[in-house]
Image (cartoon, rainbow, N blue to C red):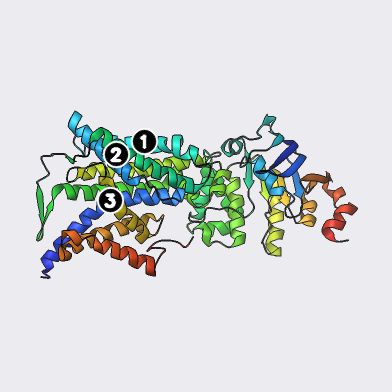
Amino acid sequence: MLDPAFLFAGILNGLLAGGIYVLVAVGLTLIYGVLHIINFAHGSLLMLAMYAVFWLWRLLGVDPYAALPVVIAGAFAFGFVLYRLLIGRYNHGRDENILLITLGLSIVFDNAALLFFGGDTQTIDVPYAGTFVEIGAAFLPLPKIISFVASLLICAALGLYMAWSDTGKAIRAVAKERQGARLVGIDVENIFAISYGIGIACLGAAACLLMPTYYVTPTSGHAFVLVAFTIVVLGGMGSFVGAAVGGFLIGITESLGGLFLGEQLGQIGISLIFILILLFKPTGLFGSKA
Amino acid sequence: MLEIASLRAGYGAIEVLRGVDLAVGAGEIVALLGSNGAGKSTLNNNVSGLYRPFGGTIRFDGHDIAGAPSTRIVEAGLVQVPEGRRVFPTLAVRDNLELGSYRRGKAARAQNLERVLAMFPRLKERLTQSAGTLSGGEQQMLAIGRGLMAEPRLLILDEPSLGLSPLLVEEMFGLIGQLNRQGLAILLVEQNVVQSLAIAHRAYVLENGRIALSGKASELAEHPDLRKSYLGH
């Protein structure tokens, strides 16, 4: 039963799945770190981005990978405007109102998608979907390898941006010290909107990388966000590194769980980790107390 | 340079400042004295654009800035070093200083960083350390350094001596005098009456949201009311 080659393949598969989780979780943790709320619209926005990728392919014939720059930019703009016009305007300065607004948006988006796109499962046919790459004993689908590498590159680029650019530093400054940020002349409201935009841009990237192997329905975003939320708690709320490490851990857990317990029960491991983290290290692996 | 006239301000329904007049001229150190709860920080934060005043005018270089956003006020060169330092705890000392020139002084960022580090050698040793791990005195230096990175024309210092050891307090007041001799106008908001009056040109005493006393610092130092309420004799 415990064939090492089998195990190796399971771990590789988990790592590959983790790449997408990392992208979704990084967006969630970034928004949490700056705005101090869980973005309840995360799953719905991922779903909208997936539909955007789907329609770009269906109507214009754009390959999902070629759509990356457009969808990332579009998702950023959508998130930015959403924050500026709705979330930032109607929260009346209270973080918990943002939570309610994003929850409301989620309901509106889900039902709008159902109304306009219907409840059918939509998929994209790409010529490379059936291409496999052999690594050791593991046969890995090419699109999953591409999505893994692209996720890592996008996260690394975002990490560098956060570390080196003035805007990135301002985002980290606003996350912990809003008043100090205002006093050096940072437009805090604008930073909120930019952070929300970047969080949604991560979803745009995830959608492009998902669609060659996955399907979209009006509810398909939520499964990812539930996993992403577990990752954010595991890594530490608001921690960038935590989201990255947690994403891969959860990906592997899910894959190995599926291997030993069967596909139906694979996600039990994730819930188990979630419970254990809450019991023994509620601040997460890389979280701070404050 | 800064002219505040009949300023009324507060929080929600509570009026803290009930008609305050105050002015700071170019090249001056003006001390704003008062006990806890007198309204000193309320005044600063209205001047800096964190809150919108209820009424009155705040003019900087002749332009009305009452109710203007903090971004515009910093841009004009009016910079506050707040009470409690408000440094960015998770960012390195260098990043904290660089963000000081986020809105203003970006062009000369490198030179200004050199200048600030020459002024605070302690910060130079800790450039890559995150600001949250610094001692209170070091954080105060960092907050002032961050303020200077914006090339301020008027610097508001809110309780810079709070929580510092007597030796550091001495150093802090020395530094304030030095900055002023380089031509910087300073509004020094303090509870430390004796040392503030020794260094300031003029001073105001804020009590219950109103200016109770004002005048030359040397004269106020001898004022019987002030001696009675703050020095106990």
Label 1: how many residues lie within 10 Å, few (<14), some (14-19) or many (20+)?
some
Residue B16 lies in quadrant = top right
Q: Amino acid at mark 3?
A: Phe
Give how far across and how far down residue A7 sits, in percent.
15, 65
User: In terms of secondary structure, where does tag 3 sit?
Assistant: helix
Residue B22 lies in quadrant = top right
Q: Amino acid at mark 1?
A: Phe
Q: Residue under mark 3: which chain is it in?
A: A
* Numbered mark located on residue A78 in the image: 1
Mark sitting earlier along the chain (3/1): 1
- In space, the residues marked 2 and 1 are separated at their CA atoms by 11 Å
User: In terms of secondary structure, where does tag 1 sit?
Assistant: helix
Mark sitting earlier along the chain (2/1): 2
Q: Is residue B186 left or right of residue A211?
A: right
Give how far across and how far down residue A105 sits, in percent.
38, 40
Q: Residue under mark 1: which chain is it in?
A: A
Give how far across and how far down residue A177 sits, in percent.
53, 51
The answer to whether the residues at label 2 and label 3 have Cβ atoms under 8 Å apart is no
- In space, the residues marked 2 and 3 are separated at their CA atoms by 13 Å
Residue marked by disc 3: A224
Residue at 37% x, 59% y is A233
Q: Is residue B222 visible?
A: no
